[in-house]
């Protein structure tokens, strides 16, 4: 019997953000329950340290950087994934699964040009293998602040459309795209009130987003009850991306401000999904995966949480966007009753890019070489206890290409200085200085040292917090990893 599958893909949730990974300023009983009933991974990584390429990697099994996708997608860009491409939902659909995506998309809509939110939004999730889509088309911090259901903005009124304006001729929105009108979005005033909002915008209320998306997920799960076909739900929560807007019932419940309160809402959302599986009596045949699209971000809320003693990424160096471990090593929990030993832990090196090849293996499906080329079958690491590492290496992608990194065994090689993420004190050396994190390459006031090596090498076994760049001590190892990374950039290894 094929198991049902739920992938809960959280946003910006760091390695230290949940109880079972060591957080004490937040309480996450539902996520911890998953770990107690399943397996926690201590060395799992997102396909990128940034939202969009990470989601691209999860759904295609191919690294975004192979398609020059390094950063977050702007609001008006076409679909990044080709409808010809084999995708994770497409694979499962082919094997008889009912498939749904609820939550944050952030991979674009349409074929070319700028997205017109008044029109049919296609191709999108439905053309990539999802039977149903409901969610936030981009991200909770950026316009358009609306919901999309399948192909259309929810609540769109033709008499009250999104307004088009001509682009400023002095400042083309993107010279690579044809010039056409762009959308004008309403703005919020200091009190959080909308001005110029359409009816569609009024349906989107920040404080209700978690509740609303949970209701949609639960409703879809209930619709699957009693059907013969298995189901796949990709629940991409906007939590815990800023702005931190939990429902008022969660405000003040954590010990680290809104950041922690938003984690509490996320935990409630996970709990509602698990409760629904129990009620529908399908929990025993449902594989649940809980992970994040990148590490924790040291934004305003993150800093408030930090000041309250909360460590977003545990003891890992760095933050979202960067190549240091804090940017991409994330919580990864798998529960599959009867198949995974409850309460177990695994130190295997895996990535969420590996889900596609692992699900293919589970279904006995042979992927073609060009399909999901970066995805490795790690099913054995999920369900058994292999003695040897399954993955010999894993490419780690930050925001900047020059800092592309390679993990191999206990070693991490990073192709340039610094994090390769945001500068200032949000993600790079300045952030280390702000957070008091130690790095042999960075001065105490947040600058790269003048004598710091041009590349970085870390021994994670001896130095899990990456305090000391040992590239001078191990030049041959660095050379070996540099060459391997160059090779992997040219082409992925045959499966
Ligand atoms: Ca993210």
Image (cartoon, rainbow, N blue to C red):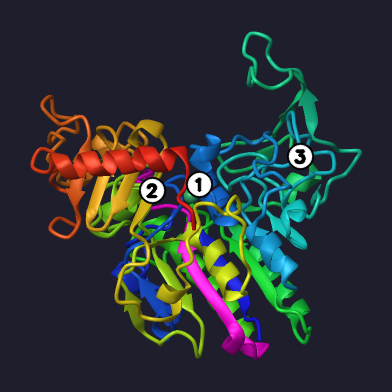
Nearest-to-viewer mark from 2 and 3: 2
Q: Secondary structure at mark 2?
A: strand
Residue occupied by mark 2 = 395
Nearest-to-viewer mark from 1 and 3: 1
Q: Residue lying furthest top in this view? A: 170
Q: Determine the residue positioned at 47% across, 47% down.
A: 492
The alpha-carbon separation of the residues under discs 2 and 3 comes to 30 Å
Residue occupied by mark 1 = 63
Q: Provide residue 466's location: percent of width, then percent of height.
A: 19, 50
Q: Secondary structure at mark 1?
A: loop
Q: Determine the residue positioned at 44% across, 47% down.
A: 48
- Residue 349, relative to residue 83: is it above or below? below
- For the magenta stretch, what is the residue range? 278-301
Q: Determine the residue positioned at 68% across, 67% down.
A: 92
Category of crowding for the residue at label 1, using alpha-carbon neighbours closer than 10 angstroms: few (below 14), some (14–19), many (at least 20): many
Left or right: residue 151 versus residue 60 is right
Q: Secondary structure at mark 3?
A: loop
Q: Provide residue 350's location: percent of width, then percent of height.
A: 40, 63
- Residue 28, relative to residue 416: is it above or below? below
Residue 50 part of the magenta segment: no
């Amino acid at each position: 019997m094929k198991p049902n599958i739920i992938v809960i893909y959280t946003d910006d949730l760091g390695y230290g953000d949940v109880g079972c990974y060591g957080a004490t300023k937040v309480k996450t009983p539902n996520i911890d329950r998953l770990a107690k009933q399943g397996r926690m991974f201590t060395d799992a990584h997102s396909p990128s340290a940034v939202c969009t390429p990470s989601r691209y990697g999860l759904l295609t099994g191919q690294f975004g950087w192979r398609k020059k996708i390094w950063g977050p997608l702007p609001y008006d860009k076409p679909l990044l994934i080709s409808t010809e491409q084999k995708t994770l939902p497409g694979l499962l659909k082919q094997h008889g699964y009912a498939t749904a995506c609820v939550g944050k998309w952030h991979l674009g809509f349409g074929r070319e040009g700028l997205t017109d939110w008044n029109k049919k939004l296609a191709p999108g999730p439905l053309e990539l293998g999802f039977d149903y889509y409901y969610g936030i088309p981009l991200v909770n911090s950026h316009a358009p602040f609306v919901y999309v259901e399948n192909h259309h903005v929810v609540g769109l009124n033709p008499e009250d459309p999104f307004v088009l304006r001509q682009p400023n001729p002095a400042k083309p929105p993107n010279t690579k795209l044809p010039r056409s009108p762009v959308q004008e979005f309403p703005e919020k005033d200091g009190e959080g009130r909308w001005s110029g909002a359409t009816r569609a915008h009024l349906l989107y209320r920040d404080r209700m987003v978690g509740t609303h998306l949970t209701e949609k997920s639960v409703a879809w799960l209930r619709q699957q009850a009693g059907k013969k076909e298995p189901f796949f739900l990709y629940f991409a929560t906007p939590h815990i991306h800023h702005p931190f807007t939990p429902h008022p019932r969660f405000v003040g419940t954590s010990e680290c401000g809104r950041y922690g309160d938003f984690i509490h809402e996320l935990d409630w959302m996970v709990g509602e999904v698990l409760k629904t599986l129990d009620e529908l009596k399908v929990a025993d045949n449902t594989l649940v995966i809980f992970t994040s699209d990148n590490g924790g971000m040291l934004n305003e809320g993150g800093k408030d949480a930090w000041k309250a003693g909360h460590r977003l990424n545990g003891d890992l160096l760095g933050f979202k966007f960067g190549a240091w471990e804090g940017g991409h090593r994330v919580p990864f929990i798998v529960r599959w009753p009867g198949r995974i030993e409850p309460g177990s832990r695994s130190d295997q090196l895996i990535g969420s890019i590996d889900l596609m090849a692992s699900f293919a293996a589970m279904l006995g499906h042979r992927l073609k070489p060009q399909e999901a080329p970066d995805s490795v079958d790690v099913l054995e690491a999920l369900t058994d206890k292999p003695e040897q590492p399954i993955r010999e290496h894993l490419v780690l992608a930050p925001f900047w290409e020059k800092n592309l990194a390679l993990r191999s065994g206990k070693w991490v090689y990073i192709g340039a200085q610094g994090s390769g993420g945001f500068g200032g004190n949000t993600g790079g050396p300045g952030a280390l200085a702000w957070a008091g994190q130690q790095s042999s390459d960075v001065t105490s006031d947040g600058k790269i040292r003048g004598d710091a090596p041009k590349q970085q090498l870390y021994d994670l076994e001896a130095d899990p917090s990456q305090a000391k760049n040992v590239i001078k001590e191990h030049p041959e190892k660095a050379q070996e990893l540099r060459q391997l990374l160059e090779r992997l950039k040219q082409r992925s290894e045959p499966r």
